[in-house]
Amino acid sequence: MTTPTDSLPPPIDVIPHRPPFLFIDRVLVCTPEQVLAERTFAADEPFFAGHFPGRPIVPGVLLLEGLAQTMAYGVRLHKAGAEVLLTGLEKTRFRHPVGPGDTVTYEITPGRTVLGVTMAEGVVRLGTRLVASAVVKGYAGR
């Protein structure tokens, strides 16, 4: 099933996360084979004040949270009412910093599901540059 980009509901209508802990702004593609989402990090994000003064960088854990939220969006859009919980991250790598004003793209490629836990390949990009990657695991229950 392919969901046209122009008919995708906003993240706030699909996943339970709310600002300031919603780390995807919009979803570009959502199919069973791929979920693409974006987030622009505003210069006034509160974490920039302490991470790091003089050289603000988006914390890596927030990029991973964005990947998890992207996966949750895909699961919930195709399995209405599912509660999706992050259960693990593997093979996590950070390759390039993200700063104020940057727009990242989160890409999730779902893999196999075993006992309700879905494993997905996730990457974060800044334009064409690879920023981070991880295997994201999430449980989708009721």
Image (spheres, grey):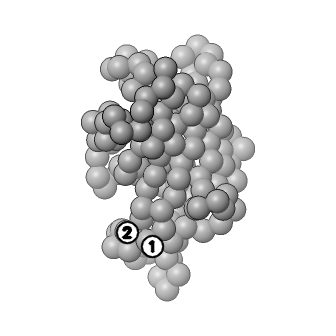
Vertical placement of residue 51 versus 14, above or below: below
Q: What residue sits 64% from the left and 59% below the top?
A: 128
Residue 42 in picture, x, y percent from top left: 37, 69
Give the residue number, with chain letter if any, for mark 2. Answer: 42
Per the image, label 1 sits on a secondary structure element best described as: loop
Task: Tell me the amino acid under the disc marked 2.
Answer: Ala
> Dot 2: what SS?
loop
Residue at image x 36%, y 35%? 8
Image mark count? 2
The label shown at residue 115 is: none
Circles 2 and 1 in contact, beta carbons < 8 Å: yes
Residue 22 appears in the rendering: yes
Q: Position of residue 27 (x, y in %)?
A: 42, 43
Residue 94 visible, this orientation: no
Quadrant in the picture for residue 95 = bottom right
Task: Classify mark 2: residues with Cα within 10 Å, few (<14), some (14-19) or many (20+).
Answer: few
Q: Quadrant of the C terminus?
A: top left
Q: Residue 25 in the image: state x and y as whole percent.
A: 37, 51
- The residue pinned by badge 1 equals 100
Residue 28, quarter of picture:
top left
Q: Is residue 126 left or right of residue 130?
A: left
**In percent of the image, x 72 and y 44: which residue is there?**
91
Mark 2 → mark 1, Cα distance in angstroms:
6 Å
**Above or below for 52 versus 68:** below
Residue 101 quadrant = bottom left
